Image (cartoon, rainbow, N blue to C red):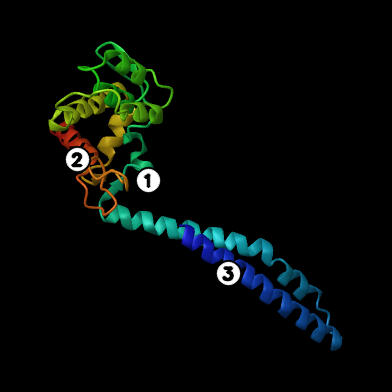
Amino acid sequence: MFPILSFFLMLYFLIGFVFGVVLRRLMIYFNGHNINAAWLYKTLLAWPITLPITIAFTIYHVVKIYKERQMANGILYINKDEEVRFLTNFSHHAIIVDGKTYATSEHYFQAAKFFETDLNWAKKVRTAKHPSDAFRLGKDKAHPIHPKWDKGEAIKHMRIALMAKLEQHDVVRKQLLDTGKMKIVERADWDAVWGDGPKRNGKNQLGRLWMSIRKELTIK
């Protein structure tokens, strides 16, 4: 999007410069030949208004075409597409697990790392103000995490978080089912485990979990 916008901005100023030169020449020419150029002046002078509208219209349709092609390819990106915006762990859908309330599924997932090793820290993560704070606290190396976190515990607790979110929020359930059979991908340049990674060949475990849960729901 940024390269497209930059291109149109350069085009905008270039056209403005050219119009300025052309307008001056035409006004001199027409006035020199006793031709009323008021209509020409008003028309050409309107370019600062008409051009931005044209640019905005063009950008809108470029984005629309991109989205349509993406949909045609059968891929939805959790961090980018409106259709699946509720599937991100940072969405503000509180969940209750084992009698405790977590502001987001990210809060639960990060806190779960310390259920067996540091309950005080788990509480601090659970009560963090923002999911990004919970994420940061969950990465704190000063507090040991579950010894088998990377050997099945992480997947187990992520699934618990997603199921709680789905069961406690109808809008999330509906959004997931509305994706049909489309592929769901966590677009994350920084994460090749839960997302698709910088080279787009990551494990996409978050997307895979959502698709697995969706399949279970459609079978029931």
Which residue was labeled with disc 2?
A: 208
Quarter the N terminus occupies: bottom left
Q: Is residue 64 above or below residue 28?
A: above
Q: Position of residue 112 (x, y in %)?
A: 25, 22
Q: Position of residue 61 (x, y in %)?
A: 46, 59
Q: Position of residue 127 (x, y in %)?
A: 38, 17
Lower position in the chain sequence, tag 2 or tag 3: 3
**Disc 1 secondary structure class:** loop
Few, some or many residues within 10 Å of mark 1 (<14, 14–19, 20+): few
Q: Residue at x 27, y 48 (%)?
A: 197
Lower position in the chain sequence, tag 3 or tag 1: 3
Amino acid type at image mark 2: Arg
Q: Are marks 2 and 3 in contact (CB under 8 Å)?
A: no
Q: Which mark is residue 80?
A: 1
Lower position in the chain sequence, tag 1 or tag 2: 1
Quarter the C terminus occupies: top left
**Disc 2 secondary structure class:** helix
Give the residue at the far top of this rendering: 99
Amino acid type at image mark 3: Leu
Q: Nearer the viewer, residue 39 or 87?
A: 87
Q: Is residue 182 above or below residue 149?
A: below
Q: Nearer the viewer, residue 66 or 137?
A: 137
For residue 105, which quarter of the picture? top left
Q: Is residue 111 above or below residue 196?
A: above
Amino acid type at image mark 1: Lys
Q: Which mark is residue 11?
A: 3
Few, some or many residues within 10 Å of mark 3 (<14, 14–19, 20+): some
**Disc 3 secondary structure class:** helix
Q: Which mark is residue 38?
A: none
